[in-house]
Amino acid sequence: MNYNDDSKRMSNFFRHALVLLSFVLAFTITGCEEEEVTIPGLYAFSDVTVVPMHTVVVLENHTVVVRGDEIEAVGPSDQIEIPEGARVIDGSGRYLMPGLAEMHGHIPGPDDPQYAEDMLFLYISNGVTTVRNMSGHNYHLELTERIDNGDIPGPSVIAATPWTSPDNIPGPEEAREAVHDFYEAGFDLIKIGNIRGDAYEALADEAHAVGIPFAGHIPEEIGLTGALEARQASIDHLDRYVEFMAEEHPEYDDRDPGFFGSGVVDLIDEDRMEEAIGQTIEAGTWNIPTLSLVEHLASPQTPEEMINWPEMRYMPPGVREHWVDAKHNFQNRDDFQPEAAQRLVEVRRDLLLMMHEHEAPIALGSDAPQFFNVPGFSIHHEMAMMVEAGLTPYEVLVTGTRNPAGYLNTPDAFGTIEDGRRADLILLEANPLTDIGNVREPAGVMVRGEWWPEERIQTHLDEIAARYEQD
């Protein structure tokens, strides 16, 4: 036996095997986009139609380059060079718009961290990349830090304080002390509940002094005019507007105002609507309408039908049962019978439209999770209702993109697709300016530069649904 010949044959065999393996690996790497060697955090949306949202325009055949958490370049595809090592996302036939803001959302507290993380992802899955968390907890400050550090996926969070009430702020002295405590803790704003009038006034004075905004409801003792005179940062749910329009009626003092004015909606003087809006504009106060909060409860659809909406599978069974009971309870209220409920819906839509026509500041919010409002999904119900109220799709999208950045006094930070803006983006299959419903099914969402393609989103959604099927 010639061992030298055998060694040569074995050597040639391994040489040929290595060459073949290298060809296989090369083919695999170049043939699969997911396996391409790219620079982390560097993306290019190629040949996409951009909906920049700084004006009513669509920009065809554009390329958008993202590096890290910022948009680095936007321009015609024949003028923008895609950086070497960028992961290219094909935008042919697709539309790229800024991420949406939910300006009245809720994130669950520390009792169930998994539930909180699931709700954060539901926002992302629907293109909601910023959430103003209204009614907070110190836990949310920690959660926000974890999101910012990339430990868990989530939208950018604007953190409100715990709900203020007579229980935690019984009077002026406690109000002033609370303002400093909230400010030093790092909250972004104070959430107003139905505190006493003197406590509200002290809180407002102190909040302006230290530089922390206060927003949310309007205490009954304060009323719309008092809140506007105090320069409340935002009024949520169109609170106290119905009462303002009804308060001069001789029967007003004998009535319980009810749920957002449902008990006095038949007494309103519509001529006072323009007066209320004028005061709002003069005060510089924003409105977050949350039409869906009332309309889901007022709709003729039964709660048993509503709880079978597809997105309900992402909510815990206990939450769903609570929503069903809540709607039945509202249907039994004296102040929320069908005629009053539908009149309240009409007045709120008219109010929103007139606010828009008078250029009063409006930002998008739905109040989720609340009364059949599943986080993320509810913002699409809200936008559809705003279109039904008379706004165009573009005008509605402005309230959810550019306007929230204006509300936060950071107009150059996010909300439009321009160089230097935060890389919060939604890739769509169809033009959102022709049909607001086209925003419902994103082909992918980018949150602060992290790309979530549709397949990855659905995998995570399926995990959430499976978790709550087991409960």
Image (cartoon, rainbow, N blue to C red):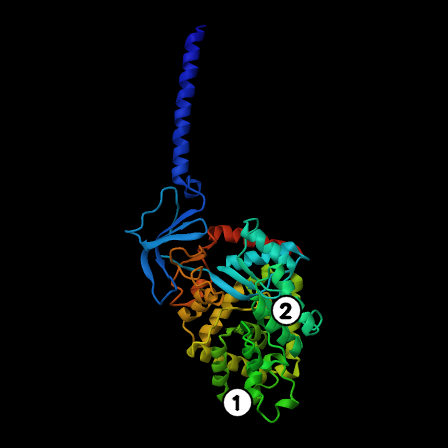
> Residue placed farthest to the front in the image?
209
Helix, strand or loop at mark 1: loop
Q: Position of residue 250 (x, y in %)?
A: 60, 94
Badge 1 crowding class, 10 Å Cα cut-off, few under 14, some 14 to 19, many 20 or more, is some
Assign the C terminus to one quadrant of the image: bottom right
Q: Quadrant of residue 190?
A: bottom right
Residue for point 69% across, 72% down = 173
Q: Position of residue 264 (x, y in %)?
A: 60, 86
Q: Is residue 412 visible?
A: yes
Kind of residue at badge 1: Asp
The circle drawn on residue 86 is: none
> Residue placed farthest to the bottom in the image?
250
Q: Which residue is identified by label 2?
A: 323
Q: How many marks on residues?
A: 2
Q: CA distance from mark 2 to mark 1?
A: 33 Å
Q: Earlier in the sequence, mark 2 or mark 1?
A: 1
Helix, strand or loop at mark 2: helix
Q: Is residue 283 left or right of residue 218?
A: left
Residue closer to the observer: 432 or 235: 235
Residue for point 55% across, 88% down = 268
> Residue placed farthest to the top in the image?
1
Q: Quadrant of residue 19?
A: top left
Q: Which residue is identified by label 1?
A: 269
